[in-house]
Image (cartoon, rainbow, N blue to C red):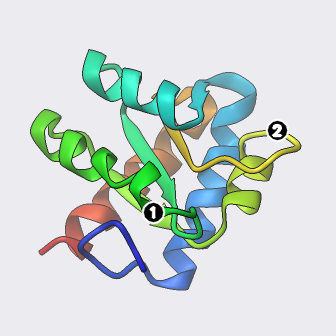
Amino acid sequence: MSVIDFEVPKNVAESVYDALEAVRGSGSIKKGVNEATKAIERGTAKLIVIAEDVSPPEIVMHIPVLCKEKKIPYISVPNKQELGKAVGIEVSTAAVAVQETGKGKREIEDIVKKINDLQK
């Protein structure tokens, strides 16, 4: 069950992982539901990524609602373990917030454009 209201194609999810890897060395990423939520509430998040395999899903269900309120783009990826790996941690994570894009600026902009296309 996805907590977001649009379908994310596999190739787009893969490009999200790649974009996060590009950002992690030179940008700023907040890891975990609490940190992502704070970044949304403070308006500092440029992109929110939510893992679909979070159990129970209630852990992340508030995130899309907050993102819509603050007009912050969000997307889901299939696997929390892969999400953790993409942002450079050895454990899984349910959600991350990109705050500074660093060298991944172009990739993040591409993801945001794809999100906008998917939501139409």
The residue at 49%/28% (across/down) is 34
Q: Is residue 29 above or below residue 78?
A: above
Q: Is residue 111 above or below residue 37?
A: below
Residue 27 in view in this figure = yes
Of mark 2 and mark 1, the one earlier in the sequence is 1
The residue at 40%/56% (across/down) is 58
Position of 17 with respect to 108 (left or right) is right
Secondary structure category for the residue under label 1: helix
**Residue type, mark 2 in image:** Ile
The residue at 30%/63% (across/down) is 115
Q: Nearer the viewer, residue 43 or 57?
A: 57
Position of 93 with respect to 37 (left or right) is right
Q: Nearer the viewer, residue 97 or 46?
A: 97
Q: Nearer the viewer, residue 27 or 3?
A: 3
Tag in front: 2 or 1: 1
Q: Which residue is mark 1?
A: 57
The percent position of residue 102, horizontal first and vertical second, equals 58, 26
The image quarter containing residue 88 is top right
Numbered-mark total: 2
Q: Locate the C terminus by quadrant.
A: bottom left
Q: Which residue is mark 2?
A: 89
**Residue type, mark 1 in image:** Pro
Secondary structure category for the residue under label 2: loop
The residue at 31%/67% (across/down) is 4
The percent position of residue 39, horizontal first and vertical second, equals 39, 23
Residue 100 in view in this figure = no
- Pointer 2 local density, CA inside 10 Å: few below 14, some 14–19, many at least 20: few
Q: Which mark is residue 35?
A: none
In the image, farthest residue toward the right: 90
